[in-house]
Amino acid sequence: MTQPPTTVYLLDDQAMIRAAFRGWIDRTGVLKVVGEKGDPRQALDEIARLRPQILLLDIAMPGLSGFDVIPKVRAAHPDCRILMLTNHEGDSFVQQAIELGADGYLSKDSDPAELTIAIAAVLAGKPYISPKVAGGLVARARGGDRTEDGKGSVLTLTPREREVFVLLAMGKTNKEVARDCKISIGTVKKHRENVQRKLDCRSPAELARLAIREGLLGS
């Protein structure tokens, strides 16, 4: 009897990225995309209804971050394996994802064939971290757990503060951050104060340098 394909749900706010992965996944013959969304809030109800075996999840998305999504999916569909698929390769993000309950962490820069390896691993109950990402973790571990320039760790930020941090590092104004996060400007200012205090960064340039070091922005 032929084994039915493993069901996959794509949650990424970039439509072109979803289309690329959907096309590749469907061509494997052993995986099948059963749903996709770019908005995390819209995706949660659909994931609970479709009950995919694998959730491929990005981190930086509008409204809710991938970190916010992990515990919600765990509560609604505990059998779902969560595989982070992201450009964010900073060690603090990997650690946070695993601590929240992600089963694996894969770089979008990885070879597409690695996706099937990662999916097979997490389905078997084995954690999977992309060698590209793991290499950075090992290098940092050997060098100690210090951040450059004495800056604080991104791990100290809440999910919302991380979202605000990335947007500020991209050079967005308080008004633009408020619009993207759908919160008030006053709330943005409060988050900004917390981010700057926790990370010991006093200017957008310092925030950008830290974001680049954490793999959140291109250098």
Image: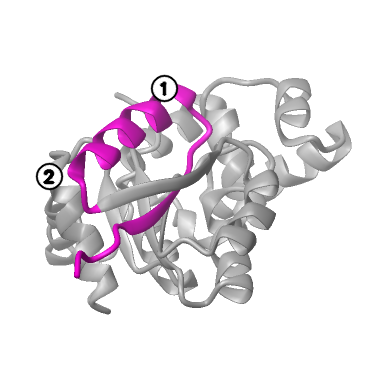
Task: Tell me residue 125's x, y (percent).
Answer: 27, 79
Residue highlighted by disc 1: 16
Q: Position of residue 197 (x, y in %)?
A: 62, 50
Q: Amino acid at mark 2?
A: Ala
Q: Residue at x 33, y 53 (%)?
A: 147
Residue 141 position (above or below residue 211): below
The quarter in which the N terminus is drawn is: bottom left
Callout 2: SS? helix
Mark 2 crowdedness (10 Å alpha carbons): few <14, some 14-19, many ≥20: few
Residue 113 is marked as 2
* Residue 108 visible to an observer of this rendering: no
Instruction: Indicate the position of residue 26 as horizontal and vertical percent values.
Output: 29, 40
**Residue 162, above or below 14:** below
Q: Is residue 29 magenta?
A: yes
Task: Find the magenta span and give its range.
Answer: 1-30
Q: Earlier in the sequence, mark 2 or mark 1?
A: 1
Q: Amino acid at mark 1?
A: Met
Q: Residues within 10 Å of mark 1 (few under 14, many from 20)?
A: few
- The residue lying at 35 percent from left, 35 percent from top is 22
Element on which disc 1 rests: helix
Q: Is residue 59 magenta?
A: no
The one nearer the camera, 185 or 42, is: 42
Above or below, 145 against 15 in this view is below
The image shows residue 184 at horizontal and vertical percentages of 87, 35
